[in-house]
Image (cartoon, coloured by chain):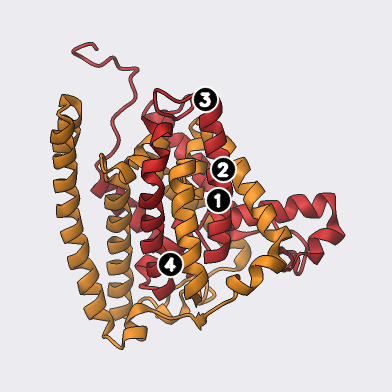
Amino acid sequence: MMAPLLKYGVFGSETSLVFAFLIGLGFGFALERAGFGSARKLVSQFYLNDLAVFKVMFTAIVTAMLGVTYLSWVGVLNLSLVYLVPTFILPQIVGGLVLGAGFVVGGYCPGTALAATATGRLDAVVYGLGLYAGTFLFAELYPVFKPLHTATPMGPITIPQYFGLPYGVVVFAVVLMAIGGFAGAGWVEKTMASRRGTDAAAIAATRE
Amino acid sequence: MSEKPASRDPAPYSNPYLAGIGLGLVLLAAFVVVGRGLGASGAVSAAVTAGLHAVAPDHAHSLEWLSGRLAGDERPLKDWLVFEGLGVFLGALVSGLLARRAFVTVEKGPRVSTRARLAGAFAGGALMAIGAAFAGGCTSGQALTGGALLNLGSWAFMLMVFAGAYAVAASMRWQWR
């Protein structure tokens, strides 16, 4: 075992801020490459014209999941030292619904809004102001929100732990789900393109 | 529409699967190097805390949800996610410049006024911040990071994000069409 490097004392927390910047560089570059600096590209996911959000997200999840699983199996990565955000199931369900609505209303999520701001999207700048306002509001009204925010605590828990399944089985199921999802996404895009009957959309759908 | 695109036209986006693999490798690097994933909304909370602390320090300390960020040296901006966010900004800018996609514009559908679109952007940002606050993270810190770690709450959150977005999509079509 030698990773996570920070947890094994390979470097200190001050140095980890340098890595934060470097990892952010890669994150921002990947988001912009994918087209996620554009609100129109992002919301196309929810009008079923262009499912790049789904494809990119699930490809990234599967890539990182397989990497983590493999590195943990060969004994390089100690998965128990990787921070797992504790589950609060009810506020996460409510928060997810609110955040999803905000995605279509605003056109971005926080990370993509930063990428879009960097590339000159003024709507992303205004979206960012909305983020600050919402965060301020939540902080000021926290006594009202606290009962829901702290409801149903379940601690740090994974799907394999909760359902009592072997880790590898769940990993395999997610890979299968993703492959099925990618095939389905291609079919949805082609169907929507032919329904619109526009040449440009048909070209976009077959370019993959 | 010219037959041959001029060299100043924005370059097409990457193949989504290639971009996804790239994003996944960045996420994997975060797990291996520092033992945590990516994030974005946390940097906003850090910035709001810093702003409040600069204007009204006592009030900032009195806010239960944010005051933890003032523990220790009272420098809320000295936060992993803030440094990551600076990287995101620069990384996206470099990618956008290389692909001629960095220019000042407002992303909107052809039939909506700029003012209405900006109002939508502001409202969406506020909703998103409240949703992320309840969930303990956004699409980066919960869906992407927790998704790859098979985090139970993150997967529930992610399904609800798609559900919430599809639920309001029809009523928001005016912004995009």
Marks 1 and 2 close (CB-CB < 8 Å): yes
Chain letter of mark 4 equals B
Q: Earlier in the sequence, mark 2 or mark 4?
A: 4
Name the mark nearer the viewer: 2 or 4.
2
Colour orange, chain: A
Disc 1 with disc 2 on a shared chain = yes
Q: Secondary structure at mark 3?
A: helix
Q: Earlier in the sequence, mark 4 or mark 1?
A: 4
The reply to whether residue B61 is in sight is yes
Marks 4 and 1 close (CB-CB < 8 Å): no
Q: Earlier in the sequence, mark 3 or mark 4?
A: 4
Local packing at callout 3 (Cα closer than 10 Å; few below 14, some 14-19, many 20+) is some
Give the residue at mark 1: B127
Give the residue at mark 3: B114
Chain letter of mark 3 equals B
Marks 2 and 3 close (CB-CB < 8 Å): no
- Structural distance between the alpha carbons of marks 2 and 3: 14 Å
The color chain B is rendered in: red
Give the residue at mark 4: B31
The reply to whether residue A18 is in sight is no
Task: Find residue A141 and report its image quarter.
Answer: bottom right
- Structural distance between the alpha carbons of marks 1 and 2: 6 Å
Local packing at callout 2 (Cα closer than 10 Å; few below 14, some 14-19, many 20+) is many
| Residue A174: mark | none
Q: Amino acid at mark 3?
A: Thr
- Structural distance between the alpha carbons of marks 4 and 1: 29 Å
- Structural distance between the alpha carbons of marks 2 and 4: 33 Å
Chain letter of mark 2 equals B
On screen, residue A202 above or below B9: below
